Image (tube, rainbow, N blue to C red):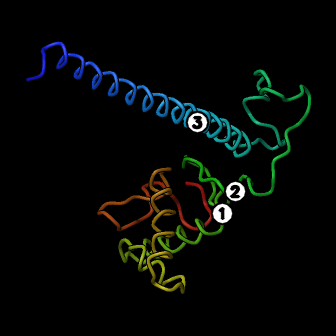
Amino acid sequence: MPSVVGLLEQRELGARRRVDELREEADRVQAELAVAEREWREWAIACSRVGEVLAPVDESGQDPARAEGTAPAAGEQTGKTPQVPEAAKRKSQVPMWREGLAWSVLSVDYQRILTALADRDRLRQGPLTCQELAVLFGLDVVPAKVEALRSKAKRLVARGWLAEGQPGRFTLAAGVAGRGGGS
């Protein structure tokens, strides 16, 4: 029969091994955490830079916040007008609808959706689904095309250009006028 001291020594040895294993695992997790935190910081910086590039610009080509006299961004030289790349054109964004805002502020795709819905409204034919819009535009009625239209229609709803009385059925929002007009 083993002695009590011998049993305690075995348990102590087992506990030490378990502590060593847990410390090794904790070190591994710490290293992974450090890598993940570094990647997250890089991602946050990249998102911030993309946000700066895609920020709306006024007619002079300057960011309105900077034109009002706020401090320049880090690394930016004072007095230097930021260059807006072609991919970030003003018309690629959907502004919030307000009275008097013309459809011409929207890209052609958004204008097509508004035109189709304005025609339906004028003829009192009711709302359209995205599948019906795809057919109307001569697109293949496949999920990718329908979902692209749905994304655009939902964005127009969120910005006040369209209304979605029933899920998936879109009409012009109250106050949005006919072709190309403001209100």
Quadrant location of the C terminus? bottom right
The residue where tag 2 is placed is 91
Q: Secondary structure at mark 1?
A: loop
* Residue drawn at 76 percent across, 25 percent down: 68
Pair 2/3: label in front = 3
**Residue 62 figure quarter:** top right
The residue where tag 1 is placed is 107
Residue furthest out toward the top = 5
Q: Position of residue 18 (x, y in %)?
A: 32, 27
Within-10-Å neighbours for mark 1: few <14, some 14–19, many 20+ = some
Inspect the image, locate mark 2, and give the three-letter code of the amino acid beneath it: Lys
Observer-nearest of 102 and 162: 162
The residue where tag 3 is placed is 35
Mark 1–mark 2 CB contact (< 8 Å): yes
41 shown above or below 158: above
Observer-nearest of 78 and 61: 78
Q: Secondary structure at mark 2?
A: helix
* Residue drawn at 29 percent across, 63 percent down: 166
Nearer the N terminus, badge 1 or badge 2? 2
Q: What label sits on residue 144 in the rendered view?
A: none
* Residue drawn at 49 percent across, 83 percent down: 136
